[in-house]
Image: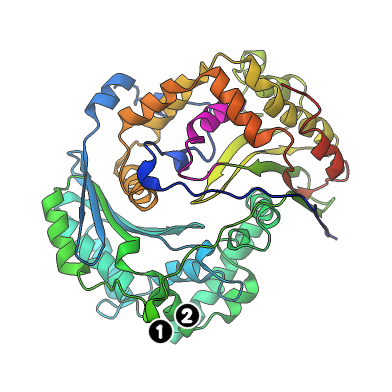
C-alpha cells in the first residue's frame, strides 16, 4: 500500500526577474534537459563532418511574419525530405486545475479528422504521401508536425492547417479518445521516472500552473467536455502565438506563400481583449514521498530552482551539468569514466543510473539530479549527489565543454530535430540562435564563472525532493537541507 507524505517548508522565496528575450544572445537550453556523456554525433557512420565544419556549414534560418502576427521560419538544408510543423505557445502551464489536460487531449483529437478531411480521408492523405504526422505537448508548448518528401510540402501545410484550425471535435470522437487518454495515463503511471519528475514539479511549484502534469489527472480526462476544448482553442490558438517552421528541402518563399494561403485567417484578437498572461510560478523548498516497498528500486529526484529560458546563467549551468554528467550501470567504464560522480557510482555500486538535468521555462527552471538505486544505497547516493553539486565544480578544468559542443551538433541530426529547434527558439526568443554564437558562449565560460553561478543557485538553498518506491532510508528533509551548506566553497 502506497503512503504519501508531503512537507512544505516555510522559506523566504526570492522573486524571479524576467529578462526580455530580445536582450539575450543565446539559448538552446531545451536540447540539454538531460545531457548524455555519449556524443550523439560520434555514433557509427555519422562521424564524417568535423565540429568546425558543422559550424561553418550551418544554413541561415530565415524569418517572416504575416500581418496577423503568425511567424514563418525555415532552414534550407538541401534534403529530398522536409519536416514542417506548427509550434504553439500552449501547454499545461496555460491550464487551470479544472481543464488541466486539455492541450494533451486536443493533441489526440487532432488526428481524428477535420471538417474537410474525416479521419479515414486524413489518414489516406498522409499515407499516400508516405509521410509521418505527429504531435507533442509540453508544459509550455504544443507542436503538430509532418515529415514528408520535399515535393509534398504544399499538401503537408494544407493538412496541418486543417488539423489546427478545423479539428472536427465530434462528441463521438471525444468519448472514444477518453479511453485512449486514460490508457496512456495508466502507461505513464507505470513509468516511475515520469512519475518521479511529475511529483518533483508538483512539490517544487505547488499552487502554481507549473505543478500541473502535461497529461492532467484521470478525473479531468473523464470529464473534459467539447466546450472545454473549444474554449481552450479559442483562448490560446492565436496567430501571434504560432510559428510555422520547416527544415530540409524547402524554400522560404514557397513556405511564406503557403502560410499566406492557409493561415492568414487565423485570429489575432481575443474576446474582450483578454490576452492570457502567465502568472509567475514560485519555487517552494519541499518534499513529496510515495513509499511503496513492492517496487524493486527507488526513484529519487532532488532539485533547486534553476535558470529561466532567457537567463544568462543558462550556459554555465549546462556546463556544470555536463561535469556531473550521467551514468547507467550498463555503460561500464569504471574508474575511466569522466564524471567524478559516475566513477563513484560505478566503483561503489551506489546506483543503477543517474542523470543531471536542467528544465527551463519562461521565468524559472529546475536544476537537479535524478537517480535510481536500491533501498540500501539511497542515503549514500543522496550524499554524493549533493557533494557533486557543492564540491565537484572546484575540481574541473572544463574539458567537458567539448562534450557539450559535440552534443549540440549531434542532437540536430535530421530535419525533424532541426525543425523542432527552430519552432521552439522562435517562440522563446524571437529568433533562431546560430550554432557559432552558441559555441562562442560556451568558450566564454570559465571555472570561476561555473563556481559563482552554481554558488548562487545551489549553495544554502532549500531543495525540492521527490521520491518513489522503497524509500524508507531516504534521509529526513532537514538533513538534506543542511547538506546544502555543510561543505563550503
Mark 2 surroundings within 10 Å by alpha-carbon count, few (fewer than 14), some (14 through 19), many (20 or more):
many
Q: Nearer the viewer, residue 180 or 25?
A: 25
- Which secondary structure lies at badge 2? helix
Quarter in which the N terminus is drawn: bottom right
Q: Is 233 colored magenta in this rendering? A: no
Is residue 400 left or right of 475 when viewed as pictured? left
Residue that numbered label 1 is attached to: 170
> Mark 1: which secondary structure?
loop
Magenta span: predominant SS is: helix
At a point 34% along the width and 36% down the height, the residue shown is 413
Instruction: Identify which residue, 233 or 109, lies in the foreground.
Output: 233
Count of all numbered marks drawn on residues in the image? 2
Residue 172, given in percent of the width and then of the height, sits at: 45, 85
- Is residue 344 visible in this depiction of the protein? yes
Q: Which mark is residue 174?
A: 2
Image coordinates of residue 480 in percent, x first then y, are 81, 38
Q: Quadrant of residue 459?
A: top right
**Residue at point 39%, 50% (across, down):** 428
The image quarter containing residue 241 is: bottom left
> Measured along the vertical axis of the image, is residue 280 above or below residue 178?
above
Give the extent of the magenta segment: 307-324
Residues tagged 2 and 1 counted as in contact (Cβ below 8 A): yes
Q: Is residue 312 magenta?
A: yes
Spatial CA distance of label 2 from label 1 is 6 Å
Amino acid at each position: 500500500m502506497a503512503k504519501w507524505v508531503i512537507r512544505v517548508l516555510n522559506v523566504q522565496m526570492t522573486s524571479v526577474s524576467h529578462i526580455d528575450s530580445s536582450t539575450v544572445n543565446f539559448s538552446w537550453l531545451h536540447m540539454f534537459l538531460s545531457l548524455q556523456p555519449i556524443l550523439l554525433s560520434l555514433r557509427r557512420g555519422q562521424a564524417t563532418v568535423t565540429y568546425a565544419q558543422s559550424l561553418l556549414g550551418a544554413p541561415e534560418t530565415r524569418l517572416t511574419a504575416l500581418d496577423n502576427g503568425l511567424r514563418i521560419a525555415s532552414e534550407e538544408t538541401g534534403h529530398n525530405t522536409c519536416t514542417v510543423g506548427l509550434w504553439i505557445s500552449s501547454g499545461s502551464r496555460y491550464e487551470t486545475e479544472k481543464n488541466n489536460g486539455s492541450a494533451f487531449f486536443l493533441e489526440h483529437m487532432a488526428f481524428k479528422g477535420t471538417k474537410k478531411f474525416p479521419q479515414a480521408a486524413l489518414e489516406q492523405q498522409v499515407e499516400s504521401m508516405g509521410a509521418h504526422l505527429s504531435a507533442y505537448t509540453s508544459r509550455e508548448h504544443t507542436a503538430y508536425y509532418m515529415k514528408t518528401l520535399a515535393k509534398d510540402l504544399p499538401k503537408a501545410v494544407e493538412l496541418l492547417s486543417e488539423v489546427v484550425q478545423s479539428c472536427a471535435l465530434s462528441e463521438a470522437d471525444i468519448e472514444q479518445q477518453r479511453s485512449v487518454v486514460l490508457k496512456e495515463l495508466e502507461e505513464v503511471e507505470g513509468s516511475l521516472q515520469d512519475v518521479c519528475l511529475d511529483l518533483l514539479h508538483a512539490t517544487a511549484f505547488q499552487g502554481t500552473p507549473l505543478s500541473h502534469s502535461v497529461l492532467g489527472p484521470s478525473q479531468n480526462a473523464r470529464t473534459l467536455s467539447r466546450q472545454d476544448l473549444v474554449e481552450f482553442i479559442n483562448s490560446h490558438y492565436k496567430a501571434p502565438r504560432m510559428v510555422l517552421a520547416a527544415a530540409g528541402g524547402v524554400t522560404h518563399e514557397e513556405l511564406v506563400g503557403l502560410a499566406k494561403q492557409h493561415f492568414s485567417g487565423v485570429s489575432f484578437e481575443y474576446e474582450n481583449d483578454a490576452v492570457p498572461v502567465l502568472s509567475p510560478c514560485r519555487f517552494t523548498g519541499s518534499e513529496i514521498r510515495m513509499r511503496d516497498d513492492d517496487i524493486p528500486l527507488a526513484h529519487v529526484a532532488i532539485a533547486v530552482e534553476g535558470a529561466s529560458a532567457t537567463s544568462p546563467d543558462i550556459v554555465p549551468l549546462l556546463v556544470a551539468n555536463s561535469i556531473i554528467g550521467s551514468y547507467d550501470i550498463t555503460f561500464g567504464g569504471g574508474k575511466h569514466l569522466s564524471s567524478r560522480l559516475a566513477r563513484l557510482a560505478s566503483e561503489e555500486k551506489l546506483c543503477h543510473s543517474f542523470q543531471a538535468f536542467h528544465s527551463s521555462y519562461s521565468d524559472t527552471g529546475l536544476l537537479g539530479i535524478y537517480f535510481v538505486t536500491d533501498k540500501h544505497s539511497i542515503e549514500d547516493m543522496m550524499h554524493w549527489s549533493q557533494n557533486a553539486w557543492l564540491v565537484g565544480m572546484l575540481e574541473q578544468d572544463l574539458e567537458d565543454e567539448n562534450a557539450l559542443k559535440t552534443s549540440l551538433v549531434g542532437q540536430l541530426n535530421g530535419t525533424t530535430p532541426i525543425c523542432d529547434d527552430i519552432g521552439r527558439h522562435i517562440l522563446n526568443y524571437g529568433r533562431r540562435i546560430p550554432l557559432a554564437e552558441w559555441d562562442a558562449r560556451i568558450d566564454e565560460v570559465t571555472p570561476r564563472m561555473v563556481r559563482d553561478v552554481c554558488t548562487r543557485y545551489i549553495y544554502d538553498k532549500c531543495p525540492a525532493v521527490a521520491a518513489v518506491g522503497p524509500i524508507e532510508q531516504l534521509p529526513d528533509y532537514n538533513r538534506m537541507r543542511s547538506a546544502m551548506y555543510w561543505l563550503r566553497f
